[in-house]
Image (spheres, grey):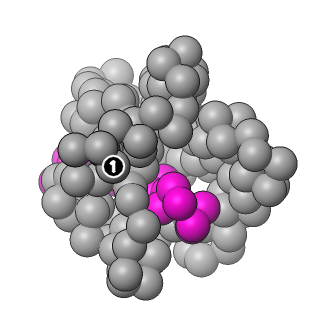
Amino acid sequence: MRERIAIEEWLRPDEHNRVREAVRMAEKGTSGEIRVHLDLAILDDVLDHAAYVFHELGMDRTRERNGVLLYVSVPGRKVAVVGDTAIHAQLGDAFWKDVLEEVLAHFRHDRFCDGLCAGVAVLGEKLKKHFPHRADDRNELSDEISFGT
C-alpha cells in the first residue's frame, strides 16, 4: 500500500486537478478520449506494458476506437503513448513522437505536471483535426488520472 500512496503523491492534489482539467479541455474539441496513467516501475518494455494497461482500462471499447493513453512509469520517467486502431490509422508513428518529445522536454526539468498537461494539449490539438467533436459525443472514459497497482 505504501507504494500506491507514493505513486499518487507524485503530483500534488492541485496538479491532479490541472491534469484532469487539461484532459477535459483537450476533449472539448475532439470525439477522441484521452487518459493519463501513472504506474510504478515495470519490468516489461514500457510500450508493451502501456498497451496492456490500455486494454485493462477498457480504452479499446470507445465508439470510434479513438482512445489515447499517455502512460508514465514514474520512477524511471518512462513514457509511452498508445492509441486505438482508428487513431493509429489516421496519425501514424510521427504523432506519438511529437507527444513524447513534448512531455519529456518538461520531465527533464522535473516539471511533471507541466509535461503531462502539455502532452495532453498536443494530443487534443492533433485529435481534433482527425476526430472533431461531434454533436452526439459523450465522455466515454474518465478524465481522472488512473494509477497502477
> Is residue 146 one of those drawn in magenta?
no
Q: Amino acid at mark 1?
A: Glu
Q: Is residue 39 above or below residue 136?
A: below
Left or right: 28, with 121 as reference point: left
Residue drawn at (80%, 56%) of the image: 108
Q: Which residues are magenta?
A: 61-78
Q: Is residue 145 above or below residue 92?
A: above
Percent across and percent down for residue 82 are: 43, 65
Residue drawn at (66%, 57%) of the image: 99
Left or right: 36, with 104 as reference point: left
Query: Is residue 74 in view?
Result: yes
The residue sitting at the front extreme is: 2
Q: Is residue 21 above or below residue 85?
A: above
Q: Secondary structure at mark 1?
A: helix
Query: Is residue 34 in view?
Result: no
Residue position marked by numbered label 1 in the rendering: 3
Percent across and percent down for residue 131 are: 46, 46
Quarter in which the N terminus is drawn: top left
Foreground residue, 131 or 116?
116
Left or right: 2, with 124 as reference point: left
Answer with the quarter of the image where residue 95 lies.
bottom right
Foreground residue, 23 or 139?
23
Q: Residues within 10 Å of mark 1 (few under 14, many from 20)?
A: few
Left or right: 141, with 119 as reference point: left
Percent across and percent down for residue 137 are: 30, 28
Residue drawn at (61%, 42%) of the image: 116
> Is residue 66 one of those drawn in magenta?
yes
Residue drawn at (28%, 61%) of the image: 54
Q: Is residue 10 above or below residue 54?
A: above
